[in-house]
């Protein structure tokens, strides 16, 4: 079973028993999440697409880990002005495990 879900304003394509890295969530490791902003649900026989969300579709997930992505360096320079700036940024993310995708008929 496959689904498209909205988490923190971004859309993710998920399937059962898979891990997904999403923007950082305020949840502890091991917490159970219920995601109800399901935009599409597809199984072997049918597809369900909602006008905004699919009614009755729920995804249950478990928080696995919190981590930070690799550092991205941003470098600015203005030639002949002796101006150089280097900045780094690391995005925080949460890894969740998709337990089940439920669709009511």
Image (cartoon, grey):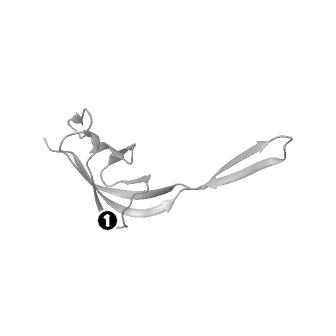
Q: Is residue 91 above or below residue 31?
A: above
Left or right: where 68 falls relative to 25: right
Picture residue at 86% right of the left edge, 41% below the top? 80
Nearest the camera: 78 or 4? 78
Left or right: where 82 falls relative to 71: right
Nearest the camera: 2 or 11? 11
Q: Is the N terminus in the top left, top right, bottom left or bottom right quadrant?
A: top left
Where in the figure is residue 50, as x and y percent of width and height? 24, 35
Looking at the rendered structure, the secondary structure element under dot 1 is: loop
Q: Residue furthest top?
A: 51
Q: Residue furthest right?
A: 80
Q: Is the C terminus in the top left, top right, bottom left or bottom right quadrant?
A: top left
Q: Quadrant of residue 97?
A: bottom left
Q: Quadrant of residue 54?
A: top left
Q: Which residue is mark 1?
A: 31
Picture residue at 84% right of the left edge, 47% below the top? 82
Nearest the camera: 27 or 96? 27
Picture mark count: 1
How many residues crowd around disc 1 within 10 Å: few (fewer than 14), some, or many (20 or more)? few
Picture residue at 77% right of the left edge, 44% below the top? 77
Q: Residue furthest left?
A: 105
Where in the figure is residue 4, as x and y percent of width and height? 32, 42
Left or right: where 46 falls relative to 86: left
Nearest the camera: 1 or 11? 11
Where in the figure is residue 89, as x and y percent of width and height? 60, 54
């Amino acid at each position: 079973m496959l689904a498209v879900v909205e988490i923190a304003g971004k859309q993710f394509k998920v399937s059962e028993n898979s891990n997904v890295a999403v923007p950082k969530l305020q949840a502890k490791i091991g917490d159970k999440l219920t995601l109800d902003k399901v935009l599409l649900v597809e199984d072997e026989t049918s597809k369900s697409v909602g006008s905004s969300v699919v009614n009755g579709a729920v995804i249950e997930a478990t928080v696995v880990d919190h981590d930070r992505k690799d550092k991205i360096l941003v470098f600015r320079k203005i030639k002949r002005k002796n101006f150089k700036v280097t900045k780094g940024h690391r995005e925080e993310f949460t890894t969740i495990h998709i337990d089940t995708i439920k669709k009511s008929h």
